[in-house]
Image (cartoon, helix red, strand yellow):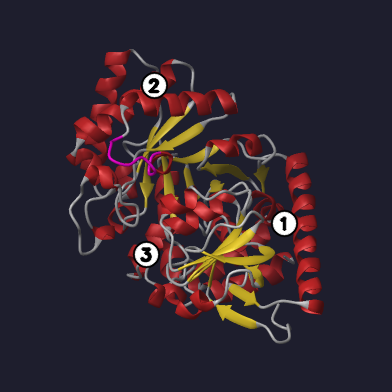
Amino acid sequence: MTDFENVTTHRGVSGSRGWVVAPIHALDDPAPQDRYVLVADDLTPADTAGLDLALVAGFCTAGGGPTSHTVQVAHNLGIPAVVAAGPMVLTVVSGTMCALDGDAGLLHAGLHGGDLRSAKDREGEHAQRDRLRRARALAVGPVAGGVTLSTTFVKPAQVAEFAHSAASGIGLLATELLFLGREGEITDEDAHFRAYTELARAVGEAEITVRTLDIGGDKPVPALKLPQEDNSFLGVRGLRLALGRPQDLLIPQLRALYRAAACGARLRIMFPMVTTVEEFTRAATIAENIRNQLRAPDVPLGVMVEVPACALTVDLFAEHVDFLSIGTNDLTQYLLATSRTNPALAHDIDPLHVSVNRTVAQVTAAAAVAAVPVTACGGLAASPVGAVVLASLGISGLTVTMAAIPAVHEALSRLDDDARRTIRHQALTTGGTDHLTEHVTARLAL
């Protein structure tokens, strides 16, 4: 929507979808008592996870990238976000009425009169559309177009939403986000155990896929006292870090998980940032030793496919793992050599680039030979177009935010075998977000 008069429009990149109208609030100004759109230079994942959702309607940052972990938290919380809007967005005065367009990556500042009324009308239309989609998804259930939908989880307050999300379970519990706010101390085994058992009780029989601590990259934890790295995304993060510090990171978390499983929690354990089969087997051996010590039940073990080396050797991993989950954000970052947090590259991150699509297809094909299920998560999975493309490339399950389920469910419900074939062909031959968005939108009348 760009037909406003006398309005300043700041163009960034879509971080999290949605449309909201509210006054702007600058991060350093005294907090208002009513809902607002937060404007900041950038936000950390911990900052974002700690936002008061009763007040923060959405946010716009000068820096950042569309697939950063900050944006992923915004997705999970269901609030619209625009990132990489440039330093001029920081000059907007607090209290200025704005429309934040998370779909198009735009912040329209200075709304008044007819423009303000028009923006509020559109906000109401968005809300009504989402209510109808949510009702249809709930009526149909968690499977659409042959693809099972599960959801992500960040904050305990989201448990109440889960029963109304049409999700089959929690497909990604990002455990680091439960503990990023703790200053000066490392989360101990009992704290992990309490978090997992409380969540398991809250969601009942639903299965929870727990990603072990994925610290590093753009998610620093001061308590760990990690050295500064020139390129943290290629450094000591994820399973690399956990294997290097088993006594205070990996073993306490695995013990907590198996204790929770022994108490009846339906869990799967997923290791992030895995490069070699040897890394997985080391972690799996530690897990099995702990399971035996605690006399706990078997828990399926899997890996995130996000490092190209892992994607290219999935056939070898498939001999050892129980499941695979493609992390589309990091896989795209590594394949295209574009940092997910660099605002200068925000417009160059193309999650539907033909190289990404071909890699996904290769992974699903290799896993199918060994009958190992492959799901996908990340910003691409939470996009209706991205979800349709991933399903057409052989993904059998998608983990998306609760806010994204209704739109993704609707798109997948329109996917038949003929559409799958044509979309798959386009994805593997030409690819590209713009091209595939146009093709899928026209093909499925989205």
Residue 394 vs residue 308, the one in the foreground: 308
74 vs 249, left or right, is right
Residue 333 numbered tag: 3
The residue to which callout 1 is attached is: 414
Which of the numbered marks, if any, corresponds to residue 68?
none
Number of callouts: 3
Horizontal and vertical percent position of residue 222 = 27, 47
Range of residues picked out in magenta:
179-186
Q: Is residue 404 left or right of residue 63?
A: right
Q: Position of residue 388 (x, y in %)?
A: 61, 58
Identify residue for label 2.
Answer: 298
Figure quadrant of residue 23: bottom right
Q: From the viewer's perspective, is 40 left or right of 169?
A: left
At 43% from the left and 65% from the top, the residue drawn is 42
Residue 317: in magenta span: no
Q: Which one is closest to the eye, mark 1 or mark 2? A: 2
Residue 262 appears in the figure = yes
